[in-house]
Image (cartoon, helix red, strand yellow):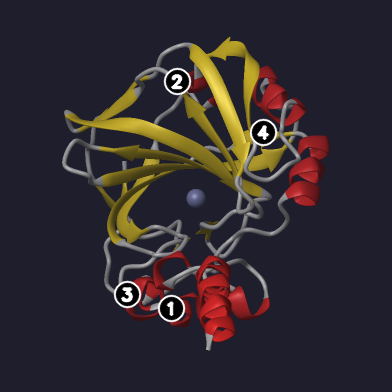
């Protein structure tokens, strides 16, 4: 009897340590943990399966309605920190940066990359896509997506790849001060629509701003990302009757 009690005391913490719990289920981009199965991995990810306003989407280049939106960048020059979180390379600015969309303020939380691009333009994917994730004070999320094609990349972007940590979960600071507005296209021309997070839990109500113009990434940086992270793009989702506006 005593031995049994000892066994229970010994095993219970081991079992609970091994289990991830229902709300922290593993997900990925391949096989049984891949995008087709996200909605079934745990009930917290159900929207990935049942949602009707999901992202990414294929953006048609014709027949879009026009709307006049104002998008202003208020990004600062600051230190950059980056981390390979196993799903992507995530970068954060250490000082406050924000955008104003129609005078509403959204603070920059982080930015990260997908390979190949998640959004398509008329059925065509780009080699990579960058997501700049912003949030307003009430928690609404605004993501600015920028397509990336191969070519000569901006020096700041090159430094990011040069200092990329190959160890998962380790954060490094990039030894340069940079303003990320510099590497974005000068024109803020974009498509906008209402969608979701492109990773579990796939929550909806996300405002998407997809830049019309791409930026450049070198072949070498693309290969480095490919080796470290690999394919991390969710397939395009049905548009349904959602409007897409060109601004
Ligand atoms: Zn993303």
**Residue at (62%, 43%) from the top-left corner?**
169
Separation of residues labelled 4 and 2 (CA atoms): 25 Å
Residue 42 visible at all: yes
Q: Residue at x 63, y 67 (%)?
A: 29
In the picture of the structure, the residue carrying the numbered disc 1 is 39
Distance Cα–Cα, label 1 vs label 2: 34 Å
Q: Which circle marks residue 216 in the picture?
A: 4
Can you say whether 200 is above or below 136 in the image? Answer: below
Is 61 placed above or below 145 here?
below
Estimate the spatial distance between the alpha carbons at disc 3 and disc 2, rounded to whole Å: 34 Å
Q: Residue at x 39, y 57 (%)?
A: 197
Q: Dot 1 surroundings within 10 Å: few (below 14), some, or many (20 or more)? A: many
Nearest to the eye among marks 4 and 1: give it: 1
Q: Going 55% across and 57% down the picture, which residue do you hit?
A: 118
In this picture, residue 236 sits left or right of residue 167: left
Cβ of mark 2 under 8 Å from ligand 1: the answer is no
Return the disc, 3 or 2, that comes first in the chain's sequence: 3
Q: Quadrant of the C terminus?
A: top left
Circle 4 SS class: strand
Q: Is residue 115 left or right of residue 144?
A: right
Mark 1 or mark 4, which is nearer the start of the sequence? 1
The residue that label 2 is drawn on is 94
Rendering quarter of residue 80: top right
> Residue 237 appears at what percent x and percent y?
45, 71
**Residue 199 or residue 216, whichever sits in front:** 199
- Point out which mark residue 51 bears: 3
Mark closer to the chain start, 1 or 2: 1
Q: Residue furthest bottom?
A: 1
Q: Are marks 3 and 4 in contact (CB under 8 Å)?
A: no
* Circles 1 and 2 in contact, beta carbons < 8 Å: no
């Amino acid at each position: 009897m005593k031995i049994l009690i000892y066994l229970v005391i010994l095993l219970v913490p081991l079992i609970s340590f091994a289990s991830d719990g229902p709300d922290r289920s593993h997900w990925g981009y391949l096989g049984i943990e891949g995008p087709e199965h996200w909605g079934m991995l745990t009930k917290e990810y159900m929207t990935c399966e049942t949602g009707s306003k999901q992202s990414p989407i294929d953006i048609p280049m014709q027949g879009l309605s026009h709307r006049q939106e104002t998008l202003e960048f208020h990004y600062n020059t600051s230190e950059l920190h980056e981390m390979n979180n196993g799903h992507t390379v995530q970068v954060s600015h250490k000082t406050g940066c924000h955008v104003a969309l129609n005078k509403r303020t959204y603070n920059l939380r982080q930015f990260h990359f997908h390979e190949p691009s998640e959004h398509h333009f008329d059925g065509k994917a780009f080699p990579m896509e960058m997501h700049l994730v912003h949030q307003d004070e009430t928690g609404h999320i605004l993501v600015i997506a920028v397509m990336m094609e191969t070519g000569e990349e901006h020096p700041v972007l090159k430094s990011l790849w040069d200092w990329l940590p190959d160890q998962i979960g380790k954060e490094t600071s990039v030894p340069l001060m940079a303003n990320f507005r510099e590497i974005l296209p000068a024109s803020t021309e974009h498509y906008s629509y209402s969608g979701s997070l492109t990773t579990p839990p796939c929550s909806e109500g996300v405002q998407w701003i997809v830049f019309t113009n791409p930026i450049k990434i070198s072949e070498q940086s693309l290969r480095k990302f490919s080796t470290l992270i690999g394919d991390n793009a969710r397939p395009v989702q049905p548009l349904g009757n959602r409007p897409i506006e060109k601004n």
